[in-house]
Image (cartoon, rainbow, N blue to C red):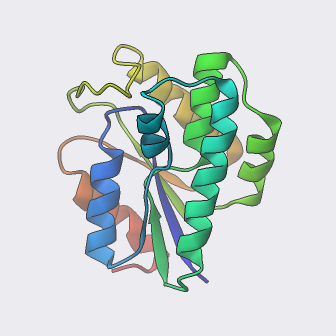
Protein backbone atom coordinates (compact mmCIF):
# COMPACT_ATOMS: atom_id res chain seq x y z
CA UNK A 1 0.00 0.00 0.00
CA UNK A 2 1.25 3.46 -0.90
CA UNK A 3 1.26 6.08 1.83
CA UNK A 4 -0.31 9.33 0.63
CA UNK A 5 0.54 12.68 2.17
CA UNK A 6 -1.11 15.86 0.89
CA UNK A 7 -0.15 19.45 1.58
CA UNK A 8 -3.16 21.78 1.85
CA UNK A 9 -3.87 25.35 2.90
CA UNK A 10 -4.36 28.91 1.71
CA UNK A 11 -2.40 30.56 -1.05
CA UNK A 12 1.17 31.58 -0.35
CA UNK A 13 1.45 29.38 2.74
CA UNK A 14 4.42 27.37 1.44
CA UNK A 15 2.64 24.28 0.06
CA UNK A 16 4.81 23.79 -3.01
CA UNK A 17 8.03 24.41 -1.12
CA UNK A 18 7.15 21.96 1.65
CA UNK A 19 5.87 19.33 -0.79
CA UNK A 20 9.15 19.49 -2.74
CA UNK A 21 11.21 19.30 0.45
CA UNK A 22 9.29 16.28 1.74
CA UNK A 23 9.50 14.47 -1.60
CA UNK A 24 13.25 15.00 -1.59
CA UNK A 25 13.64 14.04 2.07
CA UNK A 26 11.69 10.79 1.66
CA UNK A 27 12.80 10.12 -1.94
CA UNK A 28 9.15 9.95 -2.91
CA UNK A 29 7.34 10.95 -6.09
CA UNK A 30 5.95 14.48 -5.98
CA UNK A 31 2.46 15.01 -7.36
CA UNK A 32 2.59 18.62 -8.61
CA UNK A 33 -0.25 21.10 -8.51
CA UNK A 34 -2.23 20.81 -11.75
CA UNK A 35 -3.93 24.21 -11.35
CA UNK A 36 -0.81 26.33 -11.79
CA UNK A 37 0.13 25.24 -15.35
CA UNK A 38 -3.58 25.09 -16.27
CA UNK A 39 -4.10 28.70 -15.19
CA UNK A 40 -0.82 29.86 -16.71
CA UNK A 41 -2.24 28.75 -20.09
CA UNK A 42 -5.39 30.84 -19.51
CA UNK A 43 -3.52 33.86 -18.22
CA UNK A 44 -5.10 33.29 -14.81
CA UNK A 45 -8.62 33.69 -16.15
CA UNK A 46 -11.10 30.98 -15.22
CA UNK A 47 -14.77 30.28 -14.56
CA UNK A 48 -16.43 27.86 -12.17
CA UNK A 49 -16.52 24.95 -14.62
CA UNK A 50 -12.72 25.13 -14.89
CA UNK A 51 -12.51 23.84 -11.32
CA UNK A 52 -13.87 20.48 -12.50
CA UNK A 53 -11.20 20.32 -15.23
CA UNK A 54 -8.54 21.21 -12.67
CA UNK A 55 -9.83 18.53 -10.30
CA UNK A 56 -9.76 15.94 -13.10
CA UNK A 57 -6.19 16.91 -13.96
CA UNK A 58 -5.14 16.69 -10.31
CA UNK A 59 -6.67 13.23 -10.01
CA UNK A 60 -4.85 12.10 -13.16
CA UNK A 61 -1.49 13.31 -11.81
CA UNK A 62 -2.10 11.55 -8.51
CA UNK A 63 -3.13 8.32 -10.23
CA UNK A 64 0.02 8.42 -12.37
CA UNK A 65 2.17 8.73 -9.24
CA UNK A 66 0.31 5.85 -7.58
CA UNK A 67 1.06 3.62 -10.58
CA UNK A 68 4.77 3.98 -9.79
CA UNK A 69 4.21 1.52 -6.94
CA UNK A 70 6.36 3.52 -4.58
CA UNK A 71 6.01 3.34 -0.83
CA UNK A 72 4.83 6.94 -0.58
CA UNK A 73 3.68 9.90 -2.65
CA UNK A 74 3.67 13.55 -1.66
CA UNK A 75 0.82 15.61 -3.13
CA UNK A 76 1.33 19.36 -3.54
CA UNK A 77 -2.44 19.84 -3.19
CA UNK A 78 -5.54 17.70 -3.41
CA UNK A 79 -9.25 18.05 -4.10
CA UNK A 80 -9.83 19.71 -0.73
CA UNK A 81 -7.97 22.75 -2.07
CA UNK A 82 -10.29 22.83 -5.08
CA UNK A 83 -13.34 22.37 -2.85
CA UNK A 84 -12.36 25.28 -0.59
CA UNK A 85 -11.52 27.38 -3.65
CA UNK A 86 -15.01 26.71 -5.07
CA UNK A 87 -16.75 27.43 -1.77
CA UNK A 88 -14.83 30.64 -1.30
CA UNK A 89 -15.18 31.94 -4.85
CA UNK A 90 -18.58 30.56 -5.90
CA UNK A 91 -20.26 29.58 -2.60
CA UNK A 92 -20.50 25.96 -3.77
CA UNK A 93 -18.51 22.99 -4.99
CA UNK A 94 -19.32 20.78 -7.95
CA UNK A 95 -20.93 17.49 -6.85
CA UNK A 96 -18.53 15.49 -9.02
CA UNK A 97 -15.58 17.00 -7.17
CA UNK A 98 -17.22 16.14 -3.84
CA UNK A 99 -17.90 12.58 -5.04
CA UNK A 100 -14.26 12.18 -6.10
CA UNK A 101 -13.13 13.52 -2.71
CA UNK A 102 -15.10 10.75 -1.00
CA UNK A 103 -13.29 8.14 -3.10
CA UNK A 104 -9.81 9.42 -2.27
CA UNK A 105 -8.09 9.13 1.06
CA UNK A 106 -4.82 10.34 2.50
CA UNK A 107 -2.83 8.92 5.36
CA UNK A 108 -2.03 12.47 6.42
CA UNK A 109 -2.87 15.98 5.29
CA UNK A 110 -0.58 18.78 6.38
CA UNK A 111 -2.57 21.99 6.77
CA UNK A 112 -0.26 24.99 6.45
CA UNK A 113 -0.89 28.12 8.44
CA UNK A 114 -0.83 31.34 6.40
CA UNK A 115 1.84 32.81 8.68
CA UNK A 116 4.48 33.33 6.00
CA UNK A 117 4.65 36.69 4.22
CA UNK A 118 2.36 36.96 1.22
CA UNK A 119 4.22 36.54 -2.07
CA UNK A 120 2.43 38.27 -4.91
CA UNK A 121 1.83 36.16 -7.99
CA UNK A 122 -0.47 36.80 -10.96
CA UNK A 123 -2.29 33.53 -10.19
CA UNK A 124 -2.95 34.32 -6.51
CA UNK A 125 -6.16 36.04 -5.49
CA UNK A 126 -6.57 36.22 -1.70
CA UNK A 127 -3.88 38.19 0.12
CA UNK A 128 -6.31 39.46 2.75
CA UNK A 129 -8.48 36.40 3.47
CA UNK A 130 -5.87 33.78 4.22
CA UNK A 131 -6.92 33.38 7.87
CA UNK A 132 -10.54 32.91 6.82
CA UNK A 133 -9.47 30.34 4.23
CA UNK A 134 -7.33 28.53 6.82
CA UNK A 135 -10.38 28.30 9.08
CA UNK A 136 -12.39 26.80 6.21
CA UNK A 137 -9.73 24.12 5.68
CA UNK A 138 -9.48 23.41 9.40
CA UNK A 139 -13.23 23.13 9.87
CA UNK A 140 -13.59 20.85 6.84
CA UNK A 141 -10.84 18.49 8.01
CA UNK A 142 -12.21 18.34 11.55
CA UNK A 143 -15.79 17.78 10.37
CA UNK A 144 -14.70 15.06 7.94
CA UNK A 145 -12.60 13.34 10.61
CA UNK A 146 -9.58 13.23 8.31
CA UNK A 147 -6.06 12.72 9.71
CA UNK A 148 -4.23 16.03 9.59
CA UNK A 149 -1.63 18.14 11.34
CA UNK A 150 -1.33 21.91 11.36
CA UNK A 151 2.10 23.14 10.32
CA UNK A 152 3.22 26.72 10.85
CA UNK A 153 6.16 28.99 11.50
CA UNK A 154 9.53 28.87 9.83
CA UNK A 155 10.56 25.29 10.67
CA UNK A 156 7.87 23.64 8.60
CA UNK A 157 9.99 20.82 7.23
CA UNK A 158 10.96 19.46 10.65
CA UNK A 159 7.38 19.80 11.88
CA UNK A 160 6.17 17.89 8.84
CA UNK A 161 8.77 15.15 9.30
CA UNK A 162 7.77 14.79 12.96
CA UNK A 163 4.10 14.54 12.00
CA UNK A 164 4.84 11.62 9.66
CA UNK A 165 6.54 9.49 12.35
CA UNK A 166 3.27 7.92 13.58
CA UNK A 167 2.91 6.55 10.04
CA UNK A 168 6.17 4.65 10.48
CA UNK A 169 8.15 6.99 8.23
CA UNK A 170 11.70 7.84 9.25
**Residue 157 % position (x, y):** 25, 58
Q: Is residue 70 left or right of residue 86?
A: left
Which of the image's four quarters has the C terminus? bottom left
State the residue in front, 21 or 61.
61
**Residue 120 % position (x, y):** 25, 24
Q: Residue at x 80, y 43 (%)?
A: 96
Q: Residue at x 32, y 25 (%)?
A: 122
Q: Is residue 146 visible?
A: no
**Residue 3 % position (x, y):** 53, 75
State the residue in front, 150 or 11.
11
Q: Is residue 3 left or right of residue 129?
A: right
**Residue 54 % position (x, y):** 60, 43
Q: Residue at x 49, y 63 (%)?
A: 5
Above or below residue 48? Residue 145 is below
Q: Is residue 121 left or right of residue 136?
A: left
Which of the image's four quarters has the N terminus? bottom right
Amino acid sequence: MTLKIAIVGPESSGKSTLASQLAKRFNAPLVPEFARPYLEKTGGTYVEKDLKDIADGQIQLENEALRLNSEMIICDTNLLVIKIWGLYKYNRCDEQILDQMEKRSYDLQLLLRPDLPWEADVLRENPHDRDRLFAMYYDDLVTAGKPFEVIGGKDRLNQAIESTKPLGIE
